[in-house]
Image (tube, grey):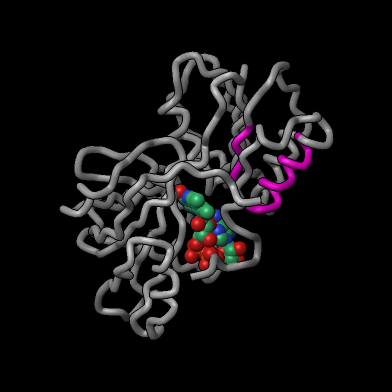
Amino acid sequence: MIPKVRRAKTRRMITLEVLANTAPSPAFRTVTLGGPQLAEFEPVGDDQAVRLFFPRAGQDRLRMPTLDNEGWMAEVLMMPKSRRPWVRNYTIRRARPGEIDIEFALHDGDAPAADWARSARPGDPAGVFDLGVSYLPPSEVAWQLLAGDESALPAVLAILENAPADLRAEVFLEVPSRSDVRAVQAPVGVRVHWLPRLRPGRPGALALAAVREADLPAGRAYAWVAGEAALATGVRRHLVRDRGWPKPDIAFLGYWRHGRSSPG
Ligand SMILES: Cc1cc2nc3c(=O)[nH]c(=O)nc-3n(C[C@H](O)[C@H](O)[C@H](O)COP(=O)(O)OP(=O)(O)OC[C@H]3O[C@@H](n4cnc5c(N)ncnc54)[C@H](O)[C@@H]3O)c2cc1C
């Protein structure tokens, strides 16, 4: 199922540059981007995501697609590999006047985006193209369930920071280690269950088990779950089959797939 998304009416391919690269905790990097073209990007908060473009090793500059619509993908594929940029999906963690932050979960493997985040330096180019927001809770729900692994941590924290003061939510956040647990800015009715992996394991498995075993509040709810594909589909299946939730009340997003590189 394709998730429901709310997008800006006009979207632009914009080219920015790295302003800073910091480490909020051992498994994460925050890369701050800015530049004159950021004026053409509208940050809306929540889980707003972008296509992130960055150069491949050995390329002397970033060549962005020119089309401001879904035709960009064909355009990129037509470029010879020597000029084609890498493309990955990332969340706008935070926006300030003239700056946006993207927070990368670092991970092993042949991983262009995680590697780029480790080494990005001020002045390096990066491009973004708005993908919109998929966190779309109906106003009439009594409470919300938010769940994710480390790839969804930026989205969940942004959603909580943007939330109305009366939000009631149960939040399940799996992170690589205890050192990645942090202070959360959220309304008083939000309970955050941190799930650090205490031994090496497949990301998402802990969060899925925690949701399955949780004593959840009563009343109609909305769920937003993102991360490794088995976490997203597993939580949805559990809520529908075992707890009788209506499918439209669940937004589930497979952000990445174990053992598979993102296309692009
Ligand atoms: C809408 C959306 C928003 C997203 N927002 C964020 C975000 O804000 N921060 C973030 O960190 N990620 C985010 N992701 C996930 C990110 O796009 C993927 O993790 C991406 O595949 C990473 O690219 P890569 O080049 O590092 O690795 P890839 O080349 O895609 O994969 C290389 C290998 O690493 C594995 N892998 C990929 N991602 C992870 C991971 N997170 N942990 C462990 N192993 C992994 C793959 O299975 C593969 O074996 C988002 C995804 C979507 C769809």
Residue at 27% across, 58% down? 14
Q: Position of residue 186 (x, y in %)?
A: 46, 23
Q: Nearer the viewer, residue 198 or 108?
A: 108
Residue interval drawn in magenta: 223-239
Whether residue 179 appears in this view of the structure is no
Q: Residue furthest left?
A: 36
In magenta segment, residue 138: no
Q: Nearer the viewer, residue 9 or 1?
A: 9
188 relative to 69 in the view: left or right? right
Residue at 63% across, 43% down? 252
135 relative to 69 in the view: left or right? right
Question: Principal SS element in the magenta part?
Answer: helix
Residue at 74% across, 45% down? 234
Q: Position of residue 210 (x, y in %)?
A: 72, 34
**Snapshot quadrant of residue 140:** top right
Q: How many marks overall?
A: 0
